[in-house]
Amino acid sequence: MTREAKSITDQLASLLVEERDALDAYETLARETADSTSHLVLEILTRETKDDLALLGQVAGGAPALEPRCASDPCDDRRFASGARGAARAAHTRAQRLRDLACSERGLERERLALLLEALAMNTDKHAHLLAQLAYCIELMTSAPPFLTATND
């Protein structure tokens, strides 16, 4: 069966299996390493993969988070979206500062510090991206014609 022919349910089930396999691999590597930096990185990956598994499980199960909770005030939504965009810009700026610090440490026999600073930068970039996407989603729903956002009561 081709990827296009698989239902979203089948694809999500497959991704859940792959995430569980990744989690098992990270946990195994963490148990096997004696290196403190490797262990720290693998702990981060394990924790984040557990969070990803929980979210993926909710999405696969039709999580309530996929539906709006209630009708909201478009003005409040626009303020929220604006705040989320501001937080995204601030996170992006912090990520760049972390990345700059990481770059300054490379080649100074402080590669482990550079690695951890880069990991923090990537995570902060992820936060910036999520905030920007959330703002976009809220803005899209706020500007959508009412017949596109109506719920079936």
Image: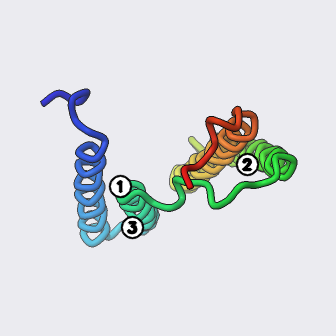
Viewed as shown, does residue 31 lie left or right of 72? Answer: left
The local crowd at label 1, few if under 14, some if 14 to 19, many if 20 or more residues have their Cα within 10 Å, is: some
Q: Which mark is residue 91?
A: 2
Judging by the rendered image, the residue that carries numbered circle 3 is 39
Q: Is residue 50 left or right of residue 145?
A: left
Amino acid under label 2? Ala
Query: What x and y, as percent, mark residue 72?
Result: 76, 55
Q: Residue at x 59, y 47 (%)?
A: 126
Give the CA separation, mark 1 to mark 3: 31 Å
Kindly identify which numbered label has been placed on residue 60: 1
Element type where label 2 sits in the image: helix
* Camera-nearest residue between 112 and 143: 143
Q: Earlier in the sequence, mark 1 or mark 3?
A: 3
Q: Residue 79's x, y, as percent?
A: 86, 49
Which residue corresponds to the image point at 24% horizontal and 69% vertical from the top-left? 32
Indicate whether 6 appears above or below 68. Answer: above
